Image (spheres, helix red, strand yellow):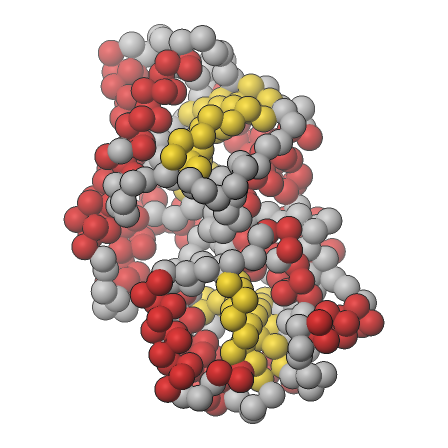
């Protein structure tokens, strides 16, 4: 099958969504598909990651925050149309808002030229979140929003979501909550909405033995009695890292937080100020940006992974932690499957977060790694996506 994928996030850098489409594309190639990927590229970030069986068409990233849909997405649209004049595909699979003008174009084509090749090529819209759902969550918490998000990115993002739902032959959502939001806010047809959660690479993320665990901890200059609370990913205010740091004030001194990943500069400064004010410098380990292939080291040194987000789709970092055998304490989403070792926060309160962390570490339960690997490997996720493709293609076989 020939697939065209529209995805803004592609490594490097290995942050945010980027590892997910990379791993999904590798898994789809293993199933025998060939893929052309139209993606974003960071200037100066290094050579773009290549995959055998995949042709990349990179575009430089947005010139200033919030400008994606008015700049690079326009460039993508005309580039894609020119490419399609010479290339036949079986599936167009578009993630997020990078394909906003392709969605609108497809809606127009279906009205004026429904028989055209482009209009009859199945379109899959892949949702990692919804703008309406994100906005509702932030309003409930009275969280301040940057001006360019409020007045530029979000209004266009809402349009993109609506056009994607209307134009797509099938929609993929990373969680049941995200699917429900699309139905609620955009009147998405439930019959064409499918949940395919994030996956994990079990060859990269896996448990280690006691001897290797102790060596890893030693290499990180951790005391054998330290209890390590891990958080990985891009640090943003909605992920509530400040609450995780606040929880340390309710925990014994040997409980430490390890933060792995980059973040919003303003928010990182707020975290630094909090650490200094509360004298937590010796209890917070800050690693910064870590390439995806090296991230398992952090999970394998942790006692518990904590993500106290206001909202999420289904973060890949949670599945990575579970695949390494590390229990997770999370909020802002729910996993469809019941997996031993997953705990959910009921309230985002520092004392409650601390109490839950202490309970998990003092009463450890074995994570069902086999279930995680069986249900959440990227190969399994690629097979699930294939079923969505089949559903969309059947629409044009009648």
**Image coords of residue 68 (percent x, y):** 29, 39
Left or right position of 317 against 215: left
**Image coords of residue 128 (percent x, y):** 43, 46
Left or right position of 261 against 210: left
Residue nearest the viewer, comparing 192 with 175 = 175
Residue at point 40% right, 9% down? Answer: 85
Left or right position of 10 against 222: left
Q: Is residue 17 above or below residue 77?
A: below
Decide if residue 144 is in sight here: yes
Quarter of the image holding residue 67?
top left
**Image coords of residue 221 (percent x, y):** 67, 77
How many marks the image carries: the answer is: 0
Q: Is residue 392 above or below residue 314?
A: above
Residue at point 36% right, 60% down? Answer: 264
Residue nearest the viewer, comparing 119 with 73 = 73
Residue at point 39% right, 74% down? Answer: 271
Pick the quarter of the image with the N terminus.
top right
Decide if residue 332 is in sight here: no
Quarter of the image holding residue 324?
bottom right
Residue at point 69% right, 30% down? Answer: 30
**Image coords of residue 329 (percent x, y):** 54, 70
Residue at the front extreme?
A: 44
Left or right position of 233 against 179: right
Q: Is residue 232 above or below residue 229?
A: above
């Amino acid at each position: 099958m020939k697939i065209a994928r529209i995805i803004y996030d592609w490594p490097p850098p290995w942050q945010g969504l980027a590892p997910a489409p990379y791993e999904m594309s590798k898994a789809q190639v293993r199933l025998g598909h060939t893929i052309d990927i139209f993606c974003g590229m960071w200037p100066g970030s290094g050579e773009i990651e290549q995959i055998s069986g995949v042709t990349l068409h990179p575009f430089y990233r947005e010139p200033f925050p919030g400008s994606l849909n008015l700049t690079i997405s326009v460039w993508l649209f005309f580039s894609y149309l020119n490419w399609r004049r010479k290339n036949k595909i079986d599936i167009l699979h578009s993630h997020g808002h990078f394909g906003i003008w392709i969605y609108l174009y497809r809606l127009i084509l279906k009205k004026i030229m429904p028989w055209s090749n482009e209009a009859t090529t199945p379109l899959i819209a892949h949702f990692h979140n919804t703008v309406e759902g994100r906005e509702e969550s932030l309003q409930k918490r009275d969280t301040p929003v940057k001006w360019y998000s409020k007045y530029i990115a979000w209004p266009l993002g809402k349009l993109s979501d609506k056009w994607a739902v209307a134009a797509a032959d099938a929609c993929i959502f990373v969680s049941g909550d995200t699917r429900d939001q699309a139905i609620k806010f955009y009147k998405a047809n439930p019959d064409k909405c499918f949940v395919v959660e994030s996956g994990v690479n079990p060859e990269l993320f896996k448990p280690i033995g006691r001897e290797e665990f102790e060596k890893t901890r030693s290499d990180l200059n951790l005391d054998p009695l330290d209890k390590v609370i891990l958080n990985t990913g891009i640090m943003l205010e909605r992920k509530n890292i400040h609450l995780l740091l606040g929880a340390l004030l309710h925990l014994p001194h040997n409980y430490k937080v390890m933060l792995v990943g980059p973040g919003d500069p303003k928010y990182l400064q707020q975290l630094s100020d909090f650490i200094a004010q509360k004298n937590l410098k010796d209890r917070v380990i800050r690693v910064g940006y870590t390439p995806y292939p090296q991230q398992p080291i952090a999970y394998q040194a942790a006692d518990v992974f904590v993500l106290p987000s206001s909202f999420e789709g289904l973060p890949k970092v949670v599945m990575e932690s579970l695949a390494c055998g590390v229990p997770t304490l999370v909020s802002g989403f729910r996993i469809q499957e019941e997996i031993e070792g997953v705990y959910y926060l009921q309230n985002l309160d520092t004392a409650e977060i601390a109490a839950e962390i202490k309970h998990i570490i003092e009463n450890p339960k074995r994570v069902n790694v086999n279930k995680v690997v069986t249900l959440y490997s990227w190969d399994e996720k690629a097979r699930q996506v294939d079923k969505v493709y089949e559903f969309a293609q059947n629409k044009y076989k009648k």
